[in-house]
Each structure stands twice: as C-alpha cells, then as structure tokens.
Image (cartoon, grey):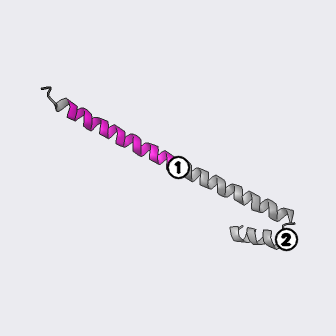
Amino acid sequence: MAPFLTLYTFLQSGFTSVEARIAFREEKGAVAIEYALLATLIALAIVLAVTGVGTALKNIFTAVAGKLVAP
C-alpha cells in the first residue's frame, strides 16, 4: 500500500483502527530498514574508496622515497 494511503487511513480512522495503526507502524519499520541499508552501502563505498586511495598514495610515496638520495 502506498505510504500516503496508509497514513490517510490511519488519520481517517481517528487513531482507533488497530489495522491502520499496525500498517502505519510496519511501514515506518520498513522505511527505517531501507535507510539503514542505504547508509550501510554508502559507508561500504566510502571505506572501499578510502582504502583504494590510501594504497595508491602509499605506492606513490614509496616510489618517491626510493628516488631520494641522502645528502
């Protein structure tokens, strides 16, 4: 059921319909889970990107350090 229809049903029931309250609560839980999954995927992407950049920087600095000559 669409979110606005569930909310509309909940509000129309005068907050007394048990089915409307349960449906509204279940939908809120589903949305919270979706946001949690999205946040997890974003965090994973950030970790992978930072790890890749860190490895590349390490290789660059190692190459530069190898070319330096002590005075």
Q: x, y (%) of residue 37?
A: 59, 50
Q: Amino acid at mark 2?
A: Gly
Q: Secondary structure at mark 2?
A: loop
Overall secondary structure of the magenta stretch?
helix
In screen coordinates, is 65 left or right of 8? left
> Within 10 angstroms of label 1, few (less than 14), some, or many (20 or more) residues?
few
List the residue tagged with mark 2.
14
- Residue 57 falls left or right of residue 10: left
Amino acid tagged 1: Leu
Disc assigned to residue 41: 1
Q: Which residue appears at 66% of the width and 58% of the height?
A: 31
Residue at 84% of width from left, 67% of height from top?
15
Instruction: Magenta stretch: give its range.
Output: 42-65
The verdict on residue 47 being magenta is: yes
User: What is the x, y in percent for residue 51?
Assistant: 40, 40
Q: Position of residue 12 (x, y in %)?
A: 81, 73
Residue 45 located within the stretch drawn in magenta? yes
Quarter that holds the N terminus: bottom right
Count neighbours of disc 2 (C-alpha within 10 A) and say few if under 14, some if 14 to 19, many if 20 or more: few
The quadrant in which residue 32 appears is bottom right
Q: CA distance from mark 1 to mark 2?
A: 39 Å
Q: Quadrant of the C terminus?
A: top left
Q: Residue furthest top?
A: 70
With respect to residue 51, does 70 lie above or below? above
